[in-house]
Image: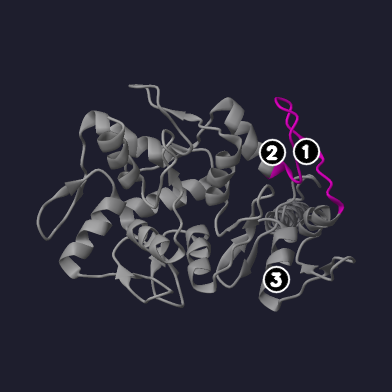
Amino acid sequence: MFGKKRRNETSEPSTNEELTQSKRRQQTKDHRGSVDSQKLKRPKRAHRYERQFSYQLYGNSFSNKSFITVQMRTHTDEKQFTCKTCGKYFYKASDLTKHIRTHTGEKPFTCECCGKCFTNSSILTTHMRTHTGEKPYACKTCGKCFSQPNDLTKHIRTHTGDKPFICESCGKCFTNSSILSSHMRIHTGEKPYACQTCGKCFSQTSALTKHIRTHTGEKPFACESCDKCFTDNSNLTKHMRTHTGEKPFICEACGKCFTNSSNLTNHIRIHTGEKPYACKTCGKCFSQTSVLAKHIKTHTGEKPHACKVCGKCFSQKGNLTKHMKTQHG
């Protein structure tokens, strides 16, 4: 018994020691598990240059802190950056920098191909495509490609028929804002583009460009069939139809066809009886400006068409032609 008791006494500490070691091992595991779980919960620190931010604002996500700062200003209307010259405000410092160049005339971005300078890099990038021929913006409907995204947007409207720009004066709709601006000058009478040679003013730059060629004699558009030259592309297009016989403009009233839209417009007035051109002297109205011009000469007595043989003058070129045939053979 004494021996047994001794064996039990000797075995009891061994059991307690095993329990103690087991508890220690369990505590160590629990501690490690706790540390591991804390590591999992703790976000990993990214490289300082690769830190990403995720923000939510009005349902939009932003990955960079600076983006949400700018976005917040658009909602709060906060404009921190002010032009000292004109007082205009901007959301971003970069926009202010670009704006300041409109005052200083600075154009730090230079085209390496032609040397032309620009106020910002995006305009230079667009310009470079005139040299490279790159047209990265393709129409998904017809495959036509464009060098600028805004040109693609305008083109897409030719498929959709969308005309989002409305004239407040007459309600007419247009596919882009520039055409609306030109149209508005019909109502306002504004003619901001002046010829430096004669001072004549025009509502559109394209009209001024055509007019300048009457002074310079430049005719850059040549017909490949007969080598006849024209001051603008639209006149060349009309002329080309004399070779092809194409008459794409059809009168819906009688079915008669015409080579250009202006002839169709004049023809339609035969059906409608419209005479929009009035003589300021006598009030007589005419369907065409050319007929009005002839009529005005009956009041002024102007006879600008002179016979080179006998010197007799006529108010109309057609009368001079008849005179030449009948009198001078």
Q: Please say if 24 is above or below 121.
A: below
Q: Residue 54 carries which label?
A: none
Proximity of marks 3 and 2: CB atoms separated by less than 8 Å:
no
Reading the chain from its start, which is encountered first: label 3 or label 2? 3
Residue 58 horizontal/vertical position (percent): 58, 73
Q: Residue 124 carries which label?
A: 2
User: Dot 2, crowdedness within 10 Å: few (<14), some or many (≥20)?
Assistant: some
Q: In this view, does 78 lie above or below 162?
A: below
At label 1, the amino acid type is Phe
- SS label for mark 2: helix
- Range covered by the magenta-colored residues: 104-122
Q: Regarding mark 1 in the picture, which secondary structure is present there?
A: strand
Q: How far is the residue under mark 3 from the one under mark 1?
A: 31 Å
Q: Does the magenta stretch include residue 116?
A: yes
**What distance separates the C-alpha of mark 3 from that of mark 2?**
30 Å
> Whole-percent x and y of residue 235?
39, 40
| Residue beneath disc 1 | 109
Amino acid type of the residue tagged 3 in the rendering? Met
Q: Which residue is drawn at 63% across and 56% down?
A: 193
Q: At 31% across and 53% down in the image, what residue appears?
A: 262
The residue at which mark 3 appears reads as: 72
Between 64 and 45, the residue placed more toward the observer is 64
Q: Looking at the rendering, in which quadrant would you find the C terminus?
A: top left
Q: Distance between the residues labelled 1 and 2?
A: 7 Å
In the rendered view of the protein, which quadrant contains the N terminus?
A: bottom right
Q: Which of marks 3 and 1 is nearer the N terminus?
A: 3
